[in-house]
Image: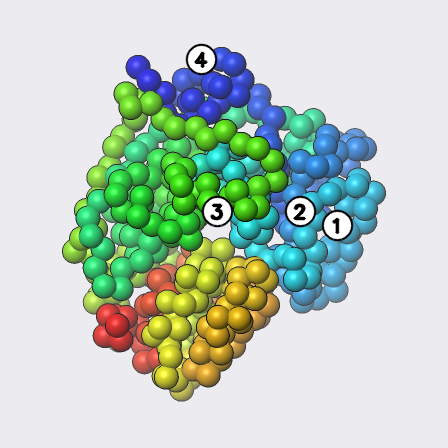
């Protein structure tokens, strides 16, 4: 029997014939952390760590509360900067126009490469699977142990194939597709599995679209979510790659614990209702729900492609009275592209407030939290209770098209009315 992506990658890397359930020690190519690095530093020192294993294999990005919203966060950033200087960590993205949200930065700067193994202290580290990498979120203490030893143990996961076919209709984006899948299989439908996204729809997707799939793989419980690399992948990464890479592909006769096939030809735009990501319904079932805040951006949908989609709806229109439209580009590179393209001017003219790249509103840290009883519609990846501020607020997840349309009408709206 042949091997799946994850079985082949780890078998080749470790020189062993590995199968699901095997527990191995592996040396990752890169390990990522963000503002939570201050807590990781403390754990590292509690472990009696003195020098990190390799200052060129650690990537730290300040993105969760930038600029700092309080003295507490400012002190945390200060601790991180001192540690970076002490350890000689090469890849540090501070609060400046080289940075942005960690997952976008690692992708833009050439760390996310086919065949690489990347761990990160963030659930949505799965994003780098869009480039054919094995990438997984881990805990802070695990990152600290990698800093100290250079290694981490992992149990080889079972593999699941998701085949996406059909012809997406007007207004249907990768976000709608992945929400439809999560709604179908549930938040634990891929629990601790390596998910391979395949099919003609994935092949035709842009790199930005594939990043949405891999990012949201975390919301179906997956350990990682990979899109097999092709010419689009190589064209993207070869511009920015940090080092050479070797793509890995599953064998044709690989054995999967489950294969799920989805035909997305006739699906409507999708909306995830509060307070779970798998509480997904067609937008027609959300019609008329009042909106107070609309967020377009984040690590899920904050790329130029997403901002252009929103601008397509918002051009020549105004945001409804009582709606706060927040625009959150995923990085300063995206911000600059959107500025030069004229997209930001369209969004500003419509009444949108453009924020600096970062995670703030998505996790309810700053720059746009909810008050009790308010509804938000967001392109982010989570809608848990209290996620964006008040635990008495309500978060609906949707595509940039749907969020933009809803901002115009002041209620959740089918974007196809505007397309």
Q: Which residue is mark 1?
A: 80
Q: Is disc 4 placed on a helix, strand or loop?
A: loop
Q: Is disc 1 placed on a helix, strand or loop?
A: helix
Q: Answer with mark 2 or mark 3, whichever residue precedes in sequence.
A: 2
Q: Answer with mark 2 or mark 4, whichever residue precedes in sequence.
A: 4
In the rendered image of this protein, does residue 346 appear above or below residue 29?
below
Residue sitting at 27 percent across and 60 percent down?
A: 172
Mark 1 vs 4: CB contact within 8 A: no
Mark 2 vs 4: CB contact within 8 A: no
Q: Which residue is mark 3?
A: 236
Label disc, if present, on residue 56 of the rendered structure: none
Residues packed near mark 1 inside 10 Å, few (<14), some (14 to 19) or many (20 plus)? many
Q: Is disc 3 placed on a helix, strand or loop?
A: helix
Residue sitting at 40 percent across and 82 percent down?
A: 319
The quadrant the N terminus occupies is top left
Closer to the camera in the image, 2 or 186? 2
Mark 1 vs 2: CB contact within 8 A: yes
CA distance for labels 2 and 4: 33 Å
Label disc, if present, on residue 60 of the rendered structure: 2
Which marked residue is nearer to the observer: mark 4 or mark 3? 3
Which marked residue is nearer to the observer: mark 1 or mark 3? 3
CA distance for labels 4 and 3: 32 Å
Is residue 378 shown left or right of residue 37?
left
Residues packed near mark 2 inside 10 Å, few (<14), some (14 to 19) or many (20 plus)? many
Q: Answer with mark 1 or mark 4, whichever residue precedes in sequence.
A: 4
Q: Answer with mark 4 or mark 3, whichever residue precedes in sequence.
A: 4
Q: Answer with mark 1 or mark 2, whichever residue precedes in sequence.
A: 2
Q: Is residue 175 visible?
A: yes
């Amino acid at each position: 029997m042949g091997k799946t992506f994850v079985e082949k990658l780890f078998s080749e890397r470790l020189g062993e014939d590995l199968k699901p359930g095997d527990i191995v020690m592996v040396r990752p190519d890169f390990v990522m952390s963000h503002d939570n690095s201050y807590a990781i530093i403390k754990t590292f020192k509690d472990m009696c760590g003195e020098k990190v294993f390799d200052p060129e294999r650690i990537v730290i990005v300040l993105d969760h509360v930038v600029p700092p919203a309080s003295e507490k966060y400012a002190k945390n950033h200060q601790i991180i900067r001192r540690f970076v200087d002490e350890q000689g960590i090469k890849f540090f993205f501070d609060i400046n126009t080289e940075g942005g949200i960690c997952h976008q930065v690692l992708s833009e700067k050439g760390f996310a490469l086919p065949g690489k193994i990347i761990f990160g202290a963030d659930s949505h580290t799965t994003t780098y699977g869009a480039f054919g990498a094995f990438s997984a979120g881990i805990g802070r203490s695990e990152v600290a142990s990698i800093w100290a030893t250079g290694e981490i143990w992992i149990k080889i996961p079972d593999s699941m194939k998701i085949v996406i076919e059909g012809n997406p209709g007007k207004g249907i984006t990768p976000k709608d597709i992945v929400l439809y899948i999560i709604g179908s299989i549930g938040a634990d439908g891929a629990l601790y599995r390596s998910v391979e996204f395949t099919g003609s729809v994935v092949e035709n997707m842009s790199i930005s679209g594939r990043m949405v799939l891999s990012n949201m793989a975390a919301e179906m419980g997956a350990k990682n979510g990979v899109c097999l690399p092709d010419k689009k992948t190589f064209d993207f990464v070869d511009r920015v790659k940090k080092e050479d890479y070797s793509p890995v592909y599953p064998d044709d006769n690989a054995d999967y614990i489950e294969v799920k096939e989805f035909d997305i030809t006739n699906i409507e735009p999708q909306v995830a209702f509060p307070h779970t990501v798998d509480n997904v319904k067609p937008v027609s079932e959300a019609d008329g729900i009042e909106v107070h805040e609309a967020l377009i951006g984040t690590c899920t949908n904050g790329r130029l492609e997403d901002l252009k989609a929103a601008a397509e709806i918002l051009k020549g229109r105004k945001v409804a009275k009582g709606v706060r439209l927040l625009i959150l580009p995923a990085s300063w590179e995206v911000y600059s592209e959107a500025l030069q393209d004229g997209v930001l001017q369209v969004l500003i003219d419509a009444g949108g407030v453009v924020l600096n790249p970062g995670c703030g509103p998505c996790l309810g840290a700053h720059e746009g939290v909810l008050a009790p009883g308010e509804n938000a519609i967001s392109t982010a990846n989570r809608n848990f209770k209290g996620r964006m501020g008040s635990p008495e607020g309500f978060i609906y997840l949707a595509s940039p098209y749907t969020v933009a349309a809803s901002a115009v009408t002041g209620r959740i709206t089918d974007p196809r009315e505007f397309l």
